[in-house]
Image (cartoon, rainbow, N blue to C red):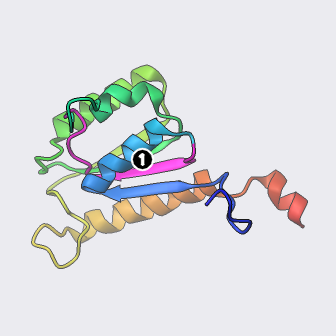
């Protein structure tokens, strides 16, 4: 992407669902390439995958962009207690983030066609995601003026 003349790599967002949510969080902590990250019920935040790999929670101090998270109150991976704990840690570290919790929502609550689908949580979370990306990925007023 960085070599592509048509891509504005100063405004990159990442979104992930389930394991992809974990990856989105890790990406926000592993690189400064992203301007915003959204985690949909990424599990295993406090689990190490591999002997020499830290758990994502251990990298919270390295988060370099705003993060938004969407979690079901009926989820077991990640359980709401873990995400509340991570929320507190990100607050303590002064990391810009917002986490949303959806009542009566299990893992995969926004995946239409699954038994776990919850249309209200899907609609609310997706609208929040679009607004979050619009806020954090929009061209600055200065860039707009320069291109006019």
Q: Nearer the viewer, residue 43 or 125?
A: 43
Image vertical order of residue 71 relative to residue 66, above or below: below
Asked if the stretch drawn in magenta spans residue 34, the answer is yes
Q: Residue at x 39, y 64 (%)?
A: 126
- Along the line of sight, which residue is nearer the eye, 52 or 124? 52
Residue extending farthest bottom: 113
Looking at the picture, how far across and down is residue 70, in whole percent? 31, 51
Residue at the outermost top position: 92
Label 1 Cα crowd, 10 Å radius (few <14 / some 14-19 / many 20+): many
The residue where tag 1 is placed is 68
Name the element at disc 1. strand
- Magenta residues span 33-47
Q: How many marks?
A: 1
Image spot of residue 53 (x, y percent): 28, 32
Q: Is residue 95 magenta?
A: no
Image quarter of residue 105: bottom left
Q: Front-most of 98 and 111?
A: 111
Q: Is residue 121 above or below residue 76?
A: below
Residue depicted at x 66% and y 58%: 138
**Left or right, 19 with reference to 66:** left
Give the left or right position of residue 70, taking residue 80 as reference. Answer: right
The quadrant in which the N terminus is found is bottom right
Q: Position of residue 9 (x, y in %)?
A: 65, 55
Residue located at (67% from left, 51% from top): 10
Q: Position of residue 29 (x, y in %)?
A: 44, 36
């Amino acid at each position: 992407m960085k070599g592509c003349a048509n891509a504005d790599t100063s405004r990159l967002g990442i979104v992930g669902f389930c394991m992809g949510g974990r990856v989105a969080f890790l990406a926000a902590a592993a690189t400064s390439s992203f301007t915003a990250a959204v985690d949909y019920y990424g599990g295993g935040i406090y689990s190490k995958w591999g002997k020499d790999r830290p758990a994502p929670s251990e990298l919270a101090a390295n988060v370099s962009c705003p993060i938004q998270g969407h979690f079901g109150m009926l989820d077991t991976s990640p359980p709401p207690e873990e995400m509340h704990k991570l929320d507190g840690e990100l607050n303590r570290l002064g990391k810009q983030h917002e986490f949303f919790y959806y009542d009566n929502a299990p893992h995969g609550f926004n995946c239409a066609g699954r038994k776990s689908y919850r249309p209200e949580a899907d609609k609310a979370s997706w609208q929040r995601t679009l607004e979050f990306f619009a806020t954090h990925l929009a061209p600055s007023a200065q860039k707009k003026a320069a291109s006019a």
